[in-house]
Image: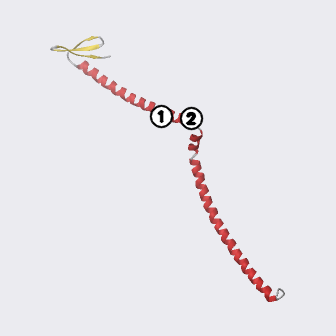
Amino acid sequence: MPDKEDYRLYLDSKFNGMASHIHSQFINVHDKLDTIEKQTTKTNNRVTKIEEDLTEYRMIKKYPKIAIFIITISVIGTVYGFMRIVDREVSTTVRAATDTLRTEIRNMDGISKTTRNGYVKYNDFGLTDSIRIR
């Protein structure tokens, strides 16, 4: 039977069919591998971006004392700056009010003499008020 020409043709046709089937499966596997490669490239890019975003977190996790020190200094600086701004605004407001009071007192009638670093105001009935003026 193996000597017959028909049998050889039969086997060749079956092996050729199997070879084409294996070849088509091979192409299918390559297509799927290409798809997987594209997906892993996208995923790796996203993971790389996330890893770059987490560098500060890693530094804080690795050096917590330095992170606490930096945060503390930042908070103290913010509070100090806020206090200076508030103090400057309050002092200018108080200075303006004091200047206004001084000019009003100097322009008022009935102010007579200075005693103990203050102006004494007189009215018809006697002493009524004492305001310190620098």
Comes first in the chain, label 1 or label 2: 2
Q: Tell me if mark 1 has few (under 14), some (14-19) or many (20+) residues whose alpha carbon lies within 10 angstroms of its own.
A: few
Residue 58 position in % (x across, y down): 58, 43
Q: Residues within 10 Å of mark 2 (few under 14, many from 20)?
A: few
Tell me if 83 is positioned left or right of 93 in this view. right
Which image quadrant: the N terminus? bottom right
Q: Pick the residue in front: 123 or 60.
A: 60
> What residue is at 48 percent from the left and 34 percent from the top?
75
Residue at the image point whose x is 27% and y is 11% from the top: 114
Residue 79: x and y in percent read 44, 32
Along the line of sight, which residue is nearer the eye, 59 or 52?
A: 59
Location of residue 103 in the rendering, given as x and y in whole percent from the top left corner: 27, 21
Question: Which residue has dot 2 on it?
Answer: 65
Residue for badge 1: 75
Give amino acid for label 2. Answer: Lys
Separation of residues labelled 1 and 2 (CA atoms): 15 Å
Q: Nearer the viewer, mark 1 or mark 2?
A: 2
Q: Is residue 93 above or below residue 3?
A: above
Question: Residue 96 appears in which quarter of the rendering?
Answer: top left
Q: Secondary structure at mark 2?
A: helix
| Residue located 30% across and 25% down the image | 97
Viewer-nearest residue: 77 or 116? 77
Task: Find residue 108 and report its image quarter.
Answer: top left
Looking at the rendered image, the quarter that the C terminus falls into is: top left
The image quadrant of residue 122 is: top left
- Extreme front residue here? 1
Residue type, label 1: Val
Q: Is residue 12 left or right of residue 83?
A: right
Please report the residue visible at 50 percent of the width from the left and 34 percent of the height from the top.
74
